[in-house]
């Protein structure tokens, strides 16, 4: 059961079922309940009632916890739960049914005890007996079967009040007034003490409230200062944001111009590279044509050499000049003239071939140089995009993000 519901049940039992009356006016109503219990014992268990009279055992000596705690002080909870259920259904008179049931089931043991033994039995042995659920169940059945009329309880209550009035009348008025005076003085002292406690609590609460108020005012001032600082920071952040937006627009324009310039440079370099590639291709074609023409000319020369009887003796199959020992029947003058002619022709051909190779190498170097410059230009453009422009934009975003957080 939740705490709120349990407290509501307690309030209901205390006020609506009359349990609160047992604790008021010096337990006057509780003593009335003791008298009613003794009168019920005299009617339902006369032999046990007489035994208690013989040993001078009164009801308040063993039954006070039954009425004040609803049997929760000594008995197991499952038994108490049944008793409380009956109490909620039938009213506070159920306590008499349970008390008579306990006395009836323990009558044989109690008749054998004296005053000390009876008190020990109620304190120790009786709660142990009902740790068994079977004994508790039989007790509850006996309590439910015991019928106690409300008229009888009312009659006993009237007898008790009549008896108390007679005792009060027989008592000396001076002693009664003195006792009443003492009771009133005690009540007055208790009320004065409560008044002092309330006054102390009031002063303490006022001091605490004043302290809390001062703390609240200090916190309010601090919050107002912080609010003003935050507003100023917000204004500064907005100015900074506008300035950064202007710088961002300028940077965007600069980057756009740089990109346009870089694109124009790339287009220009691309056109130059295209021209150089075209020139190189033309040079390569010329070189190939020249090499083909040279090979054709060399083949013609070889063919002429092979067809000439005189020249055949001077050159071998690979086109090289034979040694002097292998040439026979030729004159020295003819040999020198032909050698010189052939050497001149060969030198011219080698020179032309070397010039062609040199032009090809120069074209390749120029192509590599242009490709290198183009790669540098592209890398510079990419670096400018990734470093300067991106870093600037990221700083702008970071600044605007921080300002947005401060504004929130």
Image: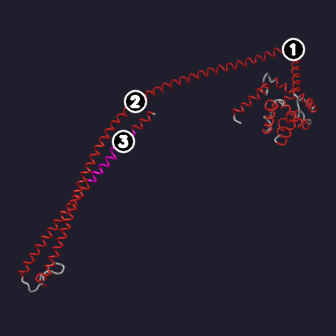
Q: Residue furthest bottom?
A: 329
Depth check, front residue: 115 or 205? 205
Q: Which mark is residue 172?
A: 1
Residue 153, quarter of the rendered image: top right
Q: Residue at x 34, y 46 (%)?
A: 387
List the residue tagged with mark 3: 393
Quadrant housing the N terminus: top right
Q: Main SS type for the magenta part?
A: helix
Q: CA separation, marks 2 and 1?
A: 92 Å
Q: Residue furthest top?
A: 174
Residue 175, quarter of the rendered image: top right
Q: Which mark is residue 25?
A: none
Say whether marks 2 and 1 touch (CB < 8 Å).
no
Q: Secondary structure at mark 3?
A: helix
Vertical placement of residue 182 versus 316, above or below: above
| Side of 249 relative to 153 (left or right) | left
Q: Which residues are magenta?
A: 374-398
Q: Residue at x 41, y 31 (%)?
A: 234
Q: Residue at x 12, y 71 (%)?
A: 347
Q: Secondary structure at mark 1?
A: loop
List the residue tagged with mark 2: 235
Q: Residue at x 18, y 64 (%)?
A: 358
381 in the magenta segment: yes
Q: CA separation, marks 2 and 3?
A: 22 Å
């Amino acid at each position: 059961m939740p705490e709120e519901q349990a407290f509501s049940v307690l309030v209901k039992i205390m006020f609506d079922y009359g349990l609160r009356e047992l604790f008021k006016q010096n337990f006057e109503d509780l003593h009335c309940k003791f008298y009613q219990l003794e009168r019920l014992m005299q009617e339902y268990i006369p032999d046990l009632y007489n035994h208690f009279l013989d040993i001078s055992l009164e009801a308040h000596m063993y039954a006070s916890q039954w009425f004040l705690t609803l049997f929760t002080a000594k008995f197991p909870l499952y038994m108490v739960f049944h008793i409380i259920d009956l109490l909620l259904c039938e009213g506070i008179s159920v306590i008499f049914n349970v008390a008579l049931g306990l006395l009836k089931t323990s009558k044989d043991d109690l008749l054998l005890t004296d005053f000390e033994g009876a008190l020990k039995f109620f304190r120790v042995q009786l709660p142990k007996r009902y740790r068994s659920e079977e004994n508790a169940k039989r007790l509850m059945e006996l309590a439910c079967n015991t019928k106690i009329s409300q008229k009888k309880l009312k009659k006993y209550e009237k007898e008790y009040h009549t008896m108390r009035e007679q005792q009060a009348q027989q008592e000396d008025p001076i002693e009664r007034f003195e006792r009443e005076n003492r009771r009133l003085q005690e009540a007055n002292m208790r009320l004065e003490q409560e008044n002092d406690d309330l006054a102390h609590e009031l002063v303490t609460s006022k001091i605490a409230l004043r302290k809390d108020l001062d703390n609240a005012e200090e916190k309010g001032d601090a919050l107002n200062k912080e609010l003003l600082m935050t507003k100023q920071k917000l204004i500064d952040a907005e100015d900074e944001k506008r300035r950064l937006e202007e710088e961002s627009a300028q940077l965007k324009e600069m980057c756009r111009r740089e990109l346009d310039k870089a694109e124009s440079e790339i287009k220009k370099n691309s056109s130059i590279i295209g021209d150089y590639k075209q020139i190189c291709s033309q040079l390569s074609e010329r070189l190939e044509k020249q090499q083909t023409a040279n090979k054709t000319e060399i083949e013609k020369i070889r063919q002429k050499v092979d067809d000439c009887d005189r020249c055949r003796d001077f050159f071998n199959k690979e086109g090289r000049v034979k040694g002097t020992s292998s040439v026979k029947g030729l004159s020295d003058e003819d040999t020198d003239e032909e050698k010189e002619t052939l050497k001149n022709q060969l030198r011219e051909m080698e020179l032309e071939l070397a010039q062609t190779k040199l032009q090809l190498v120069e074209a390749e170097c120029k192509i590599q140089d242009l490709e290198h410059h183009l790669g540098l230009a592209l890398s510079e453009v990419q670096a400018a995009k990734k470093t300067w422009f991106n870093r600037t934009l990221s700083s702008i975003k970071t600044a605007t993000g921080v300002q947005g957080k401060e504004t929130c």
